[in-house]
Image: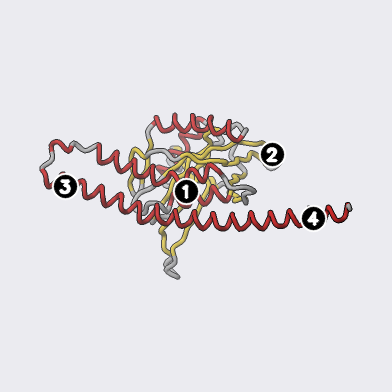
């Protein structure tokens, strides 16, 4: 049975957006952690956390991870379940579509179907970024939640098509710790990928000029991460901290005023 709805917090949505905007020339991905519930209107999925794996293959139209990353995500789900007091597991996958439509490709639908064979409630989420609206030249961000379903083609073979699932963004009552850890750790994950790519080359067989070129490419990539991700992220988090500090002061003030009024009425 297909899902009737998916729910995600606003902090998680912002984390997905931050991840998608972190790189323009390659797809990024994450695994979705959450829980299923059977409600009156059908099977509902609540996405409560994300886990960003190291990418095994990263291209502008494809992204893959190693089986080891899936094992680590399962272990992370178990650890996070103990922290939040809820039984979480891997319930879906998320990836970006830079400069292309938000709708899944046939490869995406095939990948989604392979997951659904193991778990019928498994869901895919795609975020399309860096796409320009041709009418007003404004960059758009689109999000879609989907499952894959089969149908019979005219030649008798099985085909795959998208089954869209409504996704709802809910406000957070308190800051999501997983999202904060996720966003703060994103530069470190991308840096590890760059270092892995550099380390995978056999520099012992390169001439001095090629070796210098490789080191310059690595330095350029690290500089790009700092200028376009780490520094803007630091600025954003500082702004968020100022907002939360102000809200805390206002709430404390209201609480003190309320307690004072209550004491006067009792006196």
Residues at circles 3 and 4 in contact by the CB criterion of under 8 Å: no
- How far is disc 2 from disc 4 in space, using C-alphas? 43 Å
- Discs 2/3, front: 3
Disc 3 element: helix
Q: Residue furthest left?
A: 207
The residue nearer to you, when weighing 83 against 71, is 83
- How far is disc 1 from disc 2 in space, using C-alphas? 25 Å
Which residue is located at x 45 percent, y 46 percent?
184
The disc at residue 12 is: none
Which residue is located at x 23 percent, y 49 percent?
217
Residue topped by disc 2:
39
How many other residues sit within 10 Å of disc 2, few (<14), some (14-19) or many (≥20)?
few
The disc at residue 260 is: 4
Q: Is residue 260 left or right of residue 50?
A: right
Percent coordinates x, y for residue 155 in the rendering = 42, 40
Disc 2 element: strand
The residue nearer to you, when weighing 79 against 153, is 79
- Discs 3/1, front: 3
- Discs 1/4, front: 4
Residues at circles 3 and 1 in contact by the CB criterion of under 8 Å: no
Which residue is located at x 49 percent, y 53 percent?
237
Q: Earlier in the sequence, mark 1 or mark 2?
A: 2
The residue nearer to you, when weighing 218 against 115, is 218
Q: Earlier in the sequence, mark 3 or mark 1?
A: 1
The disc at residue 212 is: 3
- Discs 2/4, front: 4
The answer to whether residue 131 is above or below residue 211 is below
Percent coordinates x, y for residue 65 in the rendering = 38, 37
Residues at circles 2 and 4 in contact by the CB criterion of under 8 Å: no
């Amino acid at each position: 049975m297909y899902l009737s709805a998916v729910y995600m917090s606003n902090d998680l949505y912002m984390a997905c957006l931050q991840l998608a905007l972190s790189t323009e020339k390659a797809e990024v991905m994450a695994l979705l952690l959450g829980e299923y519930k059977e409600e009156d209107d059908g099977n509902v999925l609540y996405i409560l956390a994300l886990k960003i794996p190291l990418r095994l293959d990263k291209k502008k139209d494809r992204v893959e991870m190693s089986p080891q990353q899936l094992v680590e995500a399962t272990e992370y789900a178990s650890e996070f379940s103990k922290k939040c007091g809820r039984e979480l597991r891997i319930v879906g996958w998320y990836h970006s579509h830079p400069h292309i439509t938000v709708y899944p490709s046939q490869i995406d639908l095939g990948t989604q179907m392979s997951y659904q064979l193991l778990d019928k409630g498994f869901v895919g989420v795609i975020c399309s970024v860096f796409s320009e609206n041709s009418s007003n030249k404004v960059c758009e961000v689109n999000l879609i939640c989907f499952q894959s379903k089969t149908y019979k083609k005219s030649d008798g073979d099985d085909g795959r098509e998208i089954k869209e699932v409504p996704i709802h963004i809910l406000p957070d009552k308190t800051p999501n710790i997983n999202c904060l850890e996720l966003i703060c750790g994103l530069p470190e994950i991308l840096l590890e990928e760059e270092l892995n790519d550099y380390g995978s080359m056999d520099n012992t067989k390169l001439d001095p000029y090629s070796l210098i070129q490789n080191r310059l490419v690595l330095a350029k990539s690290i500089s790009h991460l700092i200028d376009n991700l780490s520094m803007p992220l630091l600025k954003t988090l500082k702004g968020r901290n100022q907002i939360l500090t102000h809200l805390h002061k206002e709430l404390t003030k209201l609480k003190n005023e309320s307690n004072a009024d209550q004491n006067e009425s009792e006196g």
